[in-house]
Amino acid sequence: MKIVVIGTGYVGLVTGTCFAESGNDVTCVDINADKIERLNQGEIPIYEPGLTELVKRNSAAGRLKFTTDVAECVPGARCVFLAVGTPMDEDGSADLSGIWAACDSVAPHLEEDAIIICKSTVPVGTNRKVYERLKKSLNREVHVASNPEFLKEGCAIDDFTKPDRVVVGVMTAEAAETLEELYKPFLRTEHPFLVMGLESAEMTKYVANCMLATKISFINEMANLCEVVGADVNEVRKGIGHDQRIGFQFLFPGVGYGGSCFPKDVRALMATASEHQVSSQLLQSVDNVNKSQKCVLFEKIQRFFGSELKGKTIAIWGLAFKPRTDDIREAPALTLIDQLLEAGASIRAHDPVAMDNVKSVYGDKITYCKHQYETVEGADVLAICTEWNEYRTPDFNFMKQQLKSQAIFDGRNLYDPQKMFARGFYYSGIGLKQPK
Ligand code: NAD
C-alpha cells in the first residue's frame, strides 16, 4: 500500500518506518527541511532504541523515503496519516494549527479514494472538522479516520508492532477495512482491532492518558503522605497491588509525570470539558498534584540546607522525562534546574542521551558532564530525576568521597534506604521510611 505520513517526529517517524517494515511503500513528510535532509543522509534526529537500524534497512530497500514536498508523494497514496504535533496552547487547549496546515497542504493532491487518518492526539470533534474542511475545499466526499497512537517513547517500535489494541474511528466501512488490512501484520497475537465512531476514538486517547496520569498523581499524593506518617510507599504498593482490582502497573511514586503527552492531554481534556460546561475537578487535581510533585526534590534540598542554596553545587542524574528517550518536554528535571538556578545554586548535570536537548535550553547556565561520576566531583548533593539503568548500581564509595554533604535526593526510588543509611549517606526518596 502507498502511504504518506505528514509529520516526522517521535510518532510519525516510528509509524512510517514500521509500516515500511511490513512491506508498504512509505514517504514521510516534514516542514522541517533540516530534519528531512538529515534523514535522507541516514541520520536519525531523535533517540529511540532500535529505530536507526529499521530506518536504514527500509530506506535501503527503497520502501521508506523522506521529503518536504507533499506534491511529490500524496498523489497515488491510499492512506495519508497526519502525525504533526498538537502542543498545548496558552489556555491549555490543543493547538491545532499544525493539523489545519497539514490538511490544507495535502488537500489538492489527494486521490478520490485516499483516506486521511489523524494519528495526532486531537480533541473530540477535530476529525469531523477535518472532514468538513477537506470536503469543502475539494467539493466532493472524502474519507477521514481517527487512529490515535498509544506508543511509549523508549519502546515505541515494540509498542507499534505489538500493540495491545488498535483503535480506529471511522465514517465508512471501507476506511475500517483498509486500516485493518494495514494493521494486520501487527495484530497476529489476536490483540483487537477496535472500530468505533470518530468521537469515541478521539476520546479514547485522552481518557487513556488521563487515567494513567491520574494513577501517577494518586500514588504521588499517597507517597507524600506515607513519608510524613512513617509508612513506606513501597510496602503500601505491595499491600494494594496484590488486590487484582488495583494491580501494580503505573503506581510508581516519583517526581511527577512529564513528556509531550500527559501534561498537555490532561489540560486539553479539561479545556474540552470546560467548553461543554462540564466539570473536571478530578483532572484539575491530577494536574495540580503533578505541578507540586515536580517541586518536591527542590523543597527537600532546600530544607536540607536550611533554605540557603546560594553557592551550593547540585549534581543531577537524568534529564529526559523518562529513560530510553532524549525527550525533555515538560521533564521534571527542568523544573528542578529552574528552581535551583533561581536560588543561586550551580548545577552539574548528566543524561545518557538528552544532554544536547538540555543544552539548547540552558546554554552555559549549567555544567554538562560527559560521565555520571563527573557530576558529583565537587558537588554538595546529588538529585536523581530519571531512572536510567546505569544509575541503579553506582559506585557508592566514589560518590561518598566526592559529595561534600553525602546526601542523595532520589526522585525515582532507585536505592534501598536501609542500605544507603548503612553506607553512610543521607538518602531521601519519595514516600520512603527514613531509617533511624
Ligand atoms: P513531534 O513534535 O516530535 O513531531 C511533530 C513533527 O511534525 C515535527 O517534526 C514538525 O516539524 C512536523 N510538522 C508540524 N507541522 C507540520 C506540517 N504542517 N506539515 C508537515 N510536518 C509538520 O511530535 P510527536 O511527539 O511525534 O507527536 C505527534 C502527535 O502524536 C501529537 O499529537 C502527540 O500528542 C501524539 N502522540 C505522541 C506520542 C509520543 O510519545 N510522543 C505518543 C502518542 C501520541
Image: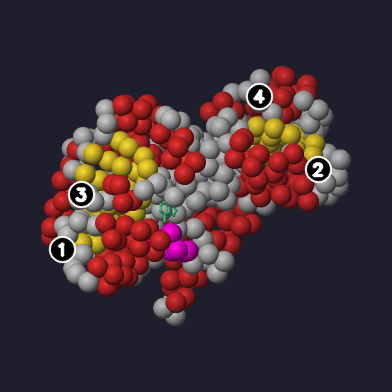
Image marks 3 and 4: residues in contact by CB distance under 8 Å = no
| 127 and 208: which is toward the camera | 127
Q: Which circle's residue, 1 or 2, is located before the other in the chain?
A: 1
Mark 2 close to ligand 1, CB under 8 Å: no
Kindly identify the amino acid type of the residue bearing the numbered disc 3.
Gly
Q: Position of residue 38 (x, y in %)?
A: 46, 35
Element at label 2: loop
> Where does label 3 land, which residue?
76
From this view, report whether residue 27 is shown above or below residue 57.
Answer: below
| 132 and 231: which is toward the camera | 132
Image marks 3 and 2: residues in contact by CB distance under 8 Å = no
User: Which mark identifies residue 345?
Assistant: 2
Disc 1 to disc 3, how far (Cα)? 20 Å
* Left or right: where 339 falls relative to 128: right
> Where does label 4 land, which residue?
371
Disc 3 to disc 4, how far (Cα)? 50 Å
> Where does label 1 land, which residue?
172
From this view, report whether residue 205 is shown above or below residue 38.
Answer: below
Whether residue 331 can be seen here: yes
Q: Which circle's residue, 4 or 2, is located before the other in the chain?
A: 2
**In this view, the mark in front (1 or 2):** 1
**In this view, the mark in front (3 or 4):** 3
